[in-house]
Image (spheres, rainbow, N blue to C red):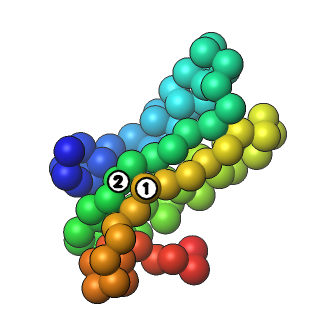
Amino acid sequence: DGTEKYAKLCNSTTGIRTFVASTVAFLQKHKFDGLDFDWEYPITLEDKSNFVYLMAALKNAFRPYGYLLSANILASGYQLDEGIQIPK
């Protein structure tokens, strides 16, 4: 689905907080054990930073419940380097 919807979601801390809170509520309601997040194409520098903020917010919110967090990310070398901050 590209990057537009996630870029828009992560454009504000309010968007990130809302997504994280609703994700935790969804996982609790349906008794899931985690989330596999699929944003394969963060393109801009802002997207790249916002991906880190979103993953950190999810990780912190999931920790008390022991939820798992995984992410589908870019597979090719140059795109991976351009789109994702692996150490973070």
In the image, residue 73 lies at what x, y percent? 40, 62
Going 49% across and 65% down the picture, which residue do you hit? 52
Going 46% across and 46% down the picture, which residue do you hit? 37
Q: Quadrant of residue 68?
A: top right
Going 51% across and 77% down the picture, which residue do you hit? 86
Residue 49, compared with residue 24, is above or below; it is below
In-front residue for pair 40/21: 40
Q: Is residue 69 left or right of residue 81?
A: right
In the image, residue 36 lies at what x, y percent? 51, 44
Q: Is residue 16 left or right of residue 20?
A: left
Q: Quadrant of residue 33?
A: top right
Query: Tags 2 and 1 in contact by the CB under 8 Å rule?
Result: yes
Q: Is residue 76 left or right of residue 52?
A: left
Mark closest to the chain's N terminus, 2 or 1: 2
Provide the residue designation for mark 1.
72
Residue 41, compared with residue 24, is above or below; it is below
- Classify mark 1: helix, strand or loop: strand
Residue 32, compared with residue 77, is above or below; it is above
| Amino acid type at mark 2 | Trp
Provide the residue designation for mark 2.
39
| Amino acid type at mark 1 | Asn
Q: Which mark is residue 47?
A: none
Q: Quick one: quadrant of the N terminus? A: top left
The single residue placed furthest to the top in the displayed view is 29
Front position among marks 2 and 1? 1
Q: How many dots with numbers?
A: 2
In the image, residue 19 lies at what x, y percent? 46, 36
Q: Quadrant of residue 15?
A: top left
Q: Is residue 66 visible?
A: yes
